[in-house]
Image (cartoon, rainbow, N blue to C red):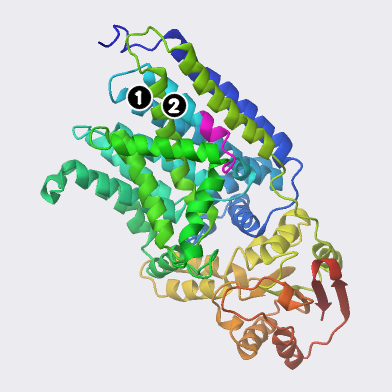
Amino acid sequence: MPRKNAHHPSSAARWLPLLLTLCALLIVGAIYQRAIRPAGGMGWDQASHALRGLNLAYDVEQRDVMGLMYDIYRQVYWPPVHTIALGSAFTLFGAGVLTARSVSLLFFLLGAAALYACGASLGRRNQQIQRGPVLGFIAAALYLTAPALTPYAGQVMLEIPALAVMYLAVWRFLRLEEDSPLSDYVWLGLSIALTFLTKLNYGVLLMAVVALELFIRAHGRPRRMFNRRLLALALAVSGPLAFWFAYPPKLMRTWEALLNQPFGAQDAFSAAGLLYYPRALVALSGSPLLFALFMVGLLYALSKMRRNRGLRILALIVLLQFTLGQLHQTKVDRHLFPLLPALYLSMAALMTDALLFARLSLPRPSRLSQAAALLLLLYSTWLFGVNLRPVSRQPDYPAAAAIAARLNPDEPALIVGTINLTRPAPPQLDWSLAAEFDVLPVTLSDVAMNIEQDASVAGLAKKLPGPEALRAAVTATALRSRSPGPVRTLYLGLSDTGYSRSPDALYRLLEGMEKEGLFTRVFVVTPIDPAKGFMPIGRAPYGTEFITEPLGRLGYVEQERLKFEKENVQVVIY
């Protein structure tokens, strides 16, 4: 028989949100002091994200509203929510590595709050109000100390922001009932769209989970699904995305982003490929013991699927994400991240039900059950401390410093490199020149911009209906990457551009840029040994002659050659 106070949180349960807040601040402080502050520079993807944030901060600084809208809208492979957060942070606190990493740390805190809210919603489903705070506390604590996630809390990557936004949407879904107000369905739809605009595959996963759960609630009868509430949900999702895909080429680029090149296994359907994610899940759990406990929690959620909608949603997230990972050609450990919080919530639900409140006649959890929960959280915290280390050890790049020292504002320069560069990679070089040495305008960075795509947009803008002033403004904004400046960068193979396909195509581009007076000096940055550089799958490395042959035809001669043997980089100045 339920306790009389089952509908009212105990005094101890009321303190759990405050206790969680204090624990979260201590953990975040430890991550900042021990993982972020001692860390070096950013890796390839991190520098790319930071450059796009720097681009938005530059637009705000210049009060360029059209430029800001354009730079947000043109993002596809990496959607704009994280970039907007970075740009806002750079505007308020200045551009820097610590600022960029701290944005992820704030999203990490938001993710903990989302997990607590999800747990509280799960606890309320069977009218056990006191159960909710306990469940949420355990799930959030497992999240905050997760060995797989905490290293990413200090990295300028999309995973942590996407998890926070996704599980805020999951929280809204857990609260949703068939008779919920229309506004609840609208908010759920908007949160799904926001998840998609934070990380594409997280949004697609969430759409699939919501669609499948609604189908199950309708007992497999599509007619029962179609009503005013479902229409409101569909419009709330499709409205923002219809605007987002109003430029048709973005659809194809999104498809390419979701189905990119194979990575992580030679054959996704070989034994190694099929075993990749099962093995990765064991490692991501933190230890074999935690993996076993999480699997028990998943089995518990599966056993309750028919009667407990909340646990069914969590099970669907885990099963769908794992199945999609097994079928997808790309194999990367972090692609399993969306299912980890669902495992934490499932495990927390099991502990709360089987240990803390197994005997509802007790006025409070037994000491044995409290000790079991405490031991799990202490073990997870111990793993957190053992695995906490600086997020990266990227060194300083002497090639970037050498280039910056040799630039002359009176002689506009073009830096030409290749995708094969690794130390520094193209995004790292551009970040160093733009943010650290402050010599490269971010609108002239080939990582942040794309000169061919911008020219295509400018051509389309000239044909748009409407006022001439609007067409002129859009055209001028799109052509910023072709505007004069002290230095600009160009990288072969970084994206699918015509000038990356042949020396003749590169010659035509350089000839046109030279006639426009965009450069009088050229810095050619290539690997000393291309075989030791970055090698995209199925593509041969670029040879130095790919660049030097067009330069020779334009009459440029070598003036200085710098070699950095340790970094496998050479800089030739023409």
On the image, the x and y values in percent for residue 108 come to 55, 38
Q: Residues within 10 Å of mark 2 (few under 14, many from 20)?
A: many
Q: Residue at x 75, y 54 (%)?
A: 394
Q: Residue at x 58, y 32 (%)?
A: 380
On the image, the x and y values in percent for residue 320 come to 36, 51
Q: Residue at x 27, y 37 (%)?
A: 305
Q: Against 140, is 485 above or below?
A: below
On the image, the x and y values in percent for residue 278 come to 48, 52
What is the magenta range?
A: 141-149
Could you tell which of marks 2 and 1 lies nearer the N-terminus?
1
Q: Is residue 358 visible?
A: yes
Q: How many marks?
A: 2
Disc 1 marks a residue whose amino acid type is: Gly
Q: Which residue is mark 1?
A: 123
Secondary structure beneath disc 2? helix
Disc 2 marks a residue whose amino acid type is: Gly
Q: Nearer the viewer, residue 168 or 536?
A: 536
The mark found on residue 136 in the picture is 2
Label 2–label 1 contact, CB within 8 A: yes
Q: Residue furthest bottom?
A: 553
